[in-house]
Image (cartoon, rainbow, N blue to C red):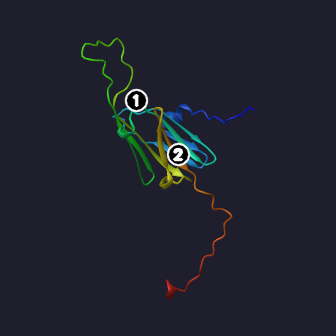
Amino acid sequence: MSRTTKKRIVTEAESRSGAFTIGKVMLLDISDESAYSPPSDVHETPEGVVIRMELPGVARGNVDVRVRGTRIEVFGEKPPDTAGEDASYLCLERSFGRFHRAFDVSGSVNLARMTAFLKEGVLVLVLPKILERRGRERRVPIVTEEEK
């Protein structure tokens, strides 16, 4: 059975500005430019927003994920892969050292329920959506000035 998926191509202007909008969620990339910034993909599911970040060769103990207010920060360090003292590199393209990626998130996701896991060199952050509250009736009590 074939399954079609919707793909939204990020425009060049969005990529330069670091602002991405998915449905009712906006992510603003506010990463520290002095550190390596791992490549990331962001997509939406019916349950939430998923951020997948490439961290090949990085152990779980070398990655830290923190949430403060509306900011998600991922940072850590990838240790260098040494070929030995006698080795002479012909080509060295892989990144090592300190990395940092940060997003400011606004919209209908619950950052308090965010989960993270590292699998096969990919860090996956799952930001669950806030359930729609439209349609639910809530009674608002009316008080007098003395009762305030």
Residue 143 in picture, x, y percent from top left: 56, 84
Residue 135 in picture, x, y percent from top left: 68, 64
- Name which residue type carries label 1: Gly
- Which of 38 and 145 lies nearest the eye of the viewer? 38
Residue 35 in picture, x, y percent from top left: 34, 34
Per the image, label 1 sits on a secondary structure element best described as loop
14 sits left or right of 33 in the view: right
- Which of 143 and 81 lies nearest the eye of the viewer? 81
Residue at image x 63%, y 58%?
132
- Tell me the mark number nearer the camera, choosing from 2 and 1: 1
Residue at image x 63%, y 75%?
139
Residue at image x 61%, y 57%?
131
Give the residue pinned by disc 2: 126
Residue at image x 59%, y 81%?
142
- Name which residue type carries label 2: Val
Which quadrant holds the N terminus? top right
Which residue occupies the extreme right position in the image? 1
Which picture quadrant has residue 136?
Answer: bottom right
Per the image, label 2 sits on a secondary structure element best described as strand
Give the residue pinned by disc 1: 57
Question: Above or below — where is 78 with respect to 126?
Answer: above
Which residue occupies the extreme left position in the image? 85
Which residue occupies the extreme bottom position in the image? 146
Residue 97 in picture, x, y percent from top left: 32, 31
